């Protein structure tokens, strides 16, 4: 079983990347958000090295590889696919739409309407996800010292976790920066370079309201250097 892959991005396709690992090409499916990160950096930089956590999924037509920039998303992809009615593509849709903190928060608070923002998730399936994964979500949040109700607005990653002027805003920015840090490391950047570019963004006063926005900002700053 493959635990992780480190290789050069040979191609970026509609729903996957082809990763060149020692001369062997691995087709790895990614969620839409992570695929956007990879496409953004590959557009301006040749021979991009990518590090991915790998989940091997057995299907009738053979085993497929699904990649993740961080292991929290891999863990929750696995939980989601254990829910009856949730397949690989649907689980990737959920992971793409929500950061794990927001996903757990929605499950704990039984917010079906939030979960239904992910493609393919209807009311009945959202209810099943809540019933099957509520205990896991509570344990996951507790293990990280987080409390439900403090980490989401409408639940989507595009508007994740911002309430200006209070401690929730600061806590949310911390989560966003941690997730962006993981994403940039997987794209081959050193911790020194990541710290430097985030510091430049803050110094310039550029705003970001989600992990995706911060990663894209970082990539633009690196490209302009």
Image (spheres, helix red, strand yellow):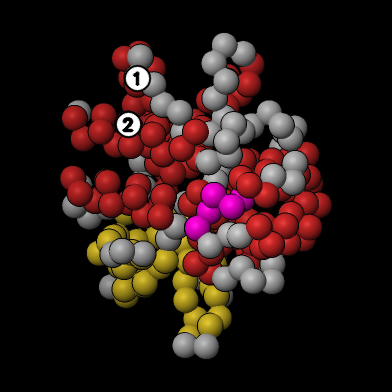
Secondary structure mostly seen in magenta is loop
Q: Where is the N terminus found, in terms of image quarters?
A: bottom right
| Residue 86, placed above or below residue 41 | below
Magenta residue span: 115-119
Q: Position of residue 142 (x, y in %)?
A: 78, 39
Q: Mark 1 or 2 closer to N-term? A: 1
**Which residue is identified by label 2?**
217
Quarter of the picture containing the C terminus is top left
Q: Could you say whether the residue bearing mark 1 is in a helix, strand or loop?
A: loop
Q: Residue at x 53, y 34 (%)?
A: 160
Q: Disc 1, disc 2: CB below 8 Å? A: yes
Q: Nearer the viewer, residue 149 or 183?
A: 149
204 displayed left or right of 174 = left
Residue 79 seen in the current view: no
Residue 194: give x, y in percent of width and height. Answer: 39, 32
Is residue 49 placed above or below 65 in the rendered structure? above
Describe residue 22's horizontal placement relative to residue 174 as left or right.
left
Q: Is residue 20 left or right of residue 71?
A: left
* Residue highlighted by disc 1: 206
Vertical relation: 87 (above or below) 121: below
Q: CA distance from mark 1 to mark 2?
A: 8 Å
In terms of image quadrants, where is residue 131?
bottom right
């Amino acid at each position: 079983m493959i635990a992780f892959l480190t290789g050069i991005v040979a191609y970026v396709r509609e729903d996957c990347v082809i990763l060149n690992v020692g001369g062997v090409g691995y087709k790895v499916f990614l969620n839409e958000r992570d695929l956007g990160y990879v496409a953004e950096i590959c557009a301006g930089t040749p021979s991009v090295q990518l590090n991915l956590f790998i989940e091997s999924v057995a299907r009738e037509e053979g085993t497929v590889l699904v990649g993740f920039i961080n292991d929290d998303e891999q863990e929750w992809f696995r939980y989601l696919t254990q829910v009856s009615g949730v397949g690989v593509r649907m689980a990737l849709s959920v992971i793409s739409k929500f950061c794990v903190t927001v996903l757990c928060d929605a499950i704990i608070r039984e917010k079906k309407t939030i979960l239904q923002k992910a493609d393919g998730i209807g009311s009945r399936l959202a209810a099943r996800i809540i019933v099957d994964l509520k205990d896991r979500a509570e344990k996951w949040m507790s293990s990280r010292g987080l409390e439900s109700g403090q980490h989401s607005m409408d639940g989507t990653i595009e508007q994740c976790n911002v309430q200006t002027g209070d401690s929730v805003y600061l806590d949310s920015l911390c989560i966003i920066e941690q997730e962006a840090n993981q994403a940039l490391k997987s794209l081959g950047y050193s911790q020194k370079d990541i710290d430097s570019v985030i510091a430049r963004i803050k110094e310039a006063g550029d705003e970001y309201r989600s992990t995706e926005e911060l990663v894209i900002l970082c990539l633009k700053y690196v490209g302009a250097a």
